[in-house]
Image (cartoon, grey):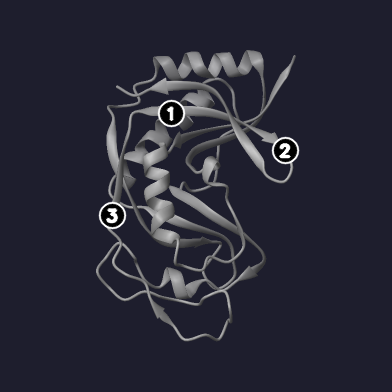
Amino acid sequence: MNSIGRVFLAVDLDVNTKAAVAAQLEDIYLPGKPSSLANWHVTLRWIGHLDEVRFDMLLAELDQTDLGPPFKVKVAGFGAFPNPETANVLFRHVGDGEGRLMELADRIEAACENVGLEPNERPYVPHLTLSRLRPPVDVSYLTDTSPEYDTDVSYFDDESETSEASEVPYMVPVRWSIDTITAFTSVFDEPHSRYKVLDTIKLG
């Protein structure tokens, strides 16, 4: 059977939301290799290599699944995997609407298992990846504060790791509506990989 590549289901961010989040980060030094703005998304379920038949089965199952109505979410503070002190992934949390995203991920997980895919054992953490760090970096200067609140946030600039801490201004919360799930596959082009849309599934 023909493979359609490495597949994942995600919430795509619209152009205006991406621009708003990117504008918030312009004056903040983010270590590591940044994720391409065009690739920004919130993963709902990583699937991996999939053939055409199983993919069509999954789409049919999702069409029959009650995924709930559209809802709104908010981009929240910084987080890191596996932890802020030795981070290899820097991300923004999803604030308002996080519970609804987790519920949506649970329903998608059930649909995946119904078509014979292996269960996903990892706890689901809704997030927007900003950069990947090799070797690991301490990013607690970002994660110890929450820029969506009216508090002082400190960061180091890219001139020196021992520079004076600077204040990041209050960030107006970025909210957007989720009404569609997108199925992506990874396309490996130099210098960055990109994601190709395979299909979309409407909520509601």
Q: Which residue is mark 2?
A: 189
Whole-percent x and y of residue 183?
53, 27
Distance between mark 1 and mark 3 Cα atoms: 23 Å
Residue at position x 40%, y 30% in the image? 107
For label 1, the crowd category at 10 Å Cα-Cα, with few meaning under 14, some 14 to 19 and many 20 or more, is many
Q: Nearer the viewer, residue 30 or 45?
A: 30
Select label 1 or label 2 by which is in front. 2
Residue kind at label 3, given as amino acid type: Pro
Q: Nearer the viewer, residue 156 or 96?
A: 156
Q: Nearer the viewer, residue 164 or 6?
A: 164
Whole-percent x and y of residue 170?
28, 66
Residue kind at label 1, given as amino acid type: Ile
Residue kind at label 2, given as amino acid type: Asp
Residue at position x 52%, y 85% in the image? 163
Q: Image check: 203 left or right of 199?
A: left
Residue 181, label in figure: 1
Seen in the picture, residue 59 relative to 96 is either above or below; the reply is: above
Residue furthest to the left: 150
Q: Which residue is mark 3?
A: 173
The tally of labels here is 3
